Amino acid sequence: MKKPRHVSVEERALWEVVAKRTEPLVKPAAKAVRAAPRKPDPQPHVTAPRHIQPFNVGQAVNHSADHDLLPSLGQQLRTAPVQMDQKAYGRLRRGKLKPDARIDLHGMTIAQAHPALTGFILRSASAGHRLVLVITGKGKQRDDGGPIPTRFGILRHQVPQWLSMAPLGGLVMQITESHIRHGGQGAYYVYLRRAR
């Protein structure tokens, strides 16, 4: 067994100086004050049960109060702030503006469509086009009945995301669903920023 080491006078003096300058990590708790016991309420608050409307089998249901956590793609685009001129935006929504160029991604896979769209937007911006039409198609109903629902129209959902990310995000001013004469929900108007 090892003998305990004896501390020298100098070491003890140094230790006392250090000990005086330090503060404890946990401060001693103040003396706890005991609260008086709470008396029970003489009239306990009872909430009335929620009234449920009567319902008959086969009756129409009002779904206006239902909550959908993710709004549809069309609603998201309609509620997005308008970045372009309001008058031009109104004409665009009514289908009065003619696109300068168009690309049809119909039938392409995601791996084919993404580079095709990127190249098209970059070429259109360098050519000075302001309004282009991107045709995605409405998509096929391909729900396989699994526990996780699949989206209706994969390209339709991917294209707005691709247009908002680099390298295209800085070139795109506005994205909106096209008028029915240009494809309706199966196509997008993409309004490009003016080249500087």
Image: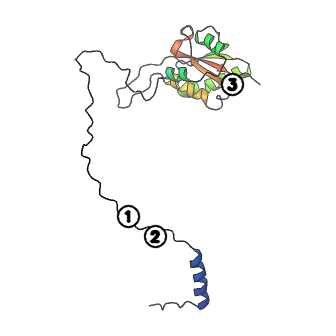
Of residues 100 and 31, the one drawn nearer to the viewer in this rendering: 31
* Residue ID for mark 1: 33
Q: Residue furthest right?
A: 196
Question: Which picture quadrant has residue 57?
Answer: top left
Q: Which mark is residue 151?
A: none
Residue ID for mark 3:
122
- Label 1, secondary structure: give it: loop
1 or 2: tag closer to the N-terminus: 2
The answer to the question of whether label 3 and label 2 lie on touching residues, with beta carbons closer than 8 A, is no
Q: Which is more foreground, mark 1 or mark 2?
A: 1
Q: Which residue is mark 2?
A: 28
Task: Tell me where residue 7 sits by quadrant.
Answer: bottom right
Find the distance from the CA under tag 3 to the CA under tag 2.
Answer: 67 Å
Q: Quadrant of the C terminus?
A: top right
Q: Percent from the top left, x then y, of residue 53? A: 26, 22
If you read the primary sequence from the N terminus, does the residue marked by circle 3 or circle 1 appear first?
1
* Label 3 or label 2, whichever comes before in sequence order: 2
Query: How crowded is the residue under tag 1: few (<14 C-alpha within 10 Å), some, or many (20+)?
Result: few
Relative to the observer, which residue lies in front, 114 or 26? 26
Q: Are marks 1 and 2 in contact (CB under 8 Å)?
A: no
Q: Residue at x 61, y 21 (%)?
A: 82
Closer to viewer: mark 3 or mark 2: 2
Q: Position of residue 104 (x, y in %)?
A: 58, 16
- Few, some or many residues within 10 Å of mark 2 (<14, 14–19, 20+): few
